[in-house]
Image: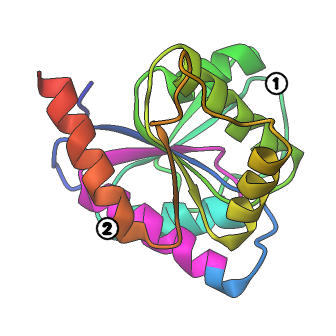
Amino acid sequence: MSTATPDGRTSLGHAVFFGGCVPASPGEEHLAYDIGATLAGQGLTLLHGGYNGLMERAARGAVEGGGTVVAVTLAGMAWGDFNPYVTAVTHQPNMGARMHTYLDNAEVIVSMSGGVGTLHELTAALWYAGNIRPVPVVVAGPTARRLLTFLRDERWVYSSPTRPLDFLHETDSAADLIPLIDAGHVRSAA
């Protein structure tokens, strides 16, 4: 699905960003910004929760990179004002519809540190990519990577012959997203 960005460019698809309201460190805030800018630079529309913290940093990077930022939230929930970088909003009737809005058309999903909401989003993305469609899921930043290490060590996340984890990636650099996005565009065009 392609849409127009604010500067008239065509969006090549959607990137999903999951991250919490309370950043773990200034370094992770910078990484979120770089991720948003990189995703926009690749022609992707950024979908996120729309609020502050890491979401706002990624949104700012995306908008300053010429991209579009969509807040995906629940109808009837008043969690506060959206961050100033949100360019469009979609209100979903329930959490299932919200998650499908994120996951069904994503070219890439990036998750950073956060609270239980971000944890829920990450685990939903892992399940989706392992069972529905192998969209790249990227765990970014030292805090989220420590969580993934824990989940692997405790066997909550593991590869098997019927459910490989080829979709799962880790990074501390936004530049690492580019080959994953390029590979996804090649698959989409085939």
Q: Is residue 95 visible?
A: yes
- Give residue 113's quadrant in the image: bottom right
Asked whether 74 falls inside the magenta stretch, the response is no
* Residue at 56%, 21% in the rendered image: 163
Q: Is residue 30 above or below residue 130?
A: below
Q: CA distance from mark 1 to mark 2?
A: 31 Å
- Image check: 181 left or right of 28? left
SS at mark 2?
loop
Q: Which residue is mark 1?
A: 76
Name the kind of residue labelled 1 in the image. Gly
Labels 1 and 2: the sequence-earlier one: 2
Q: Which residues are magenta?
A: 28-51
Q: Is residue 12 visible?
A: no
Outermost residue, front side? 161
**Residue 86: horizontal and vertical position, in percent?**
53, 52
Q: Which mark is residue 65?
A: 2
Asked whether 39 falls inside the magenta stretch, the response is yes
**Residue 59: horizontal and vertical position, in percent?**
51, 60
**Residue 15: horizontal and vertical position, in percent?**
42, 43
Name the kind of residue labelled 2 in the image. Gly
Give the quarter of the figure containing the N terminus.
top left
Q: Which mark is residue 166?
A: none
Outermost residue, bottom side? 26
* Residue at 28%, 58% in the rendered image: 178
- Give residue 154's quadrant in the image: top right
* Residue at 53%, 72% in the rendered image: 172
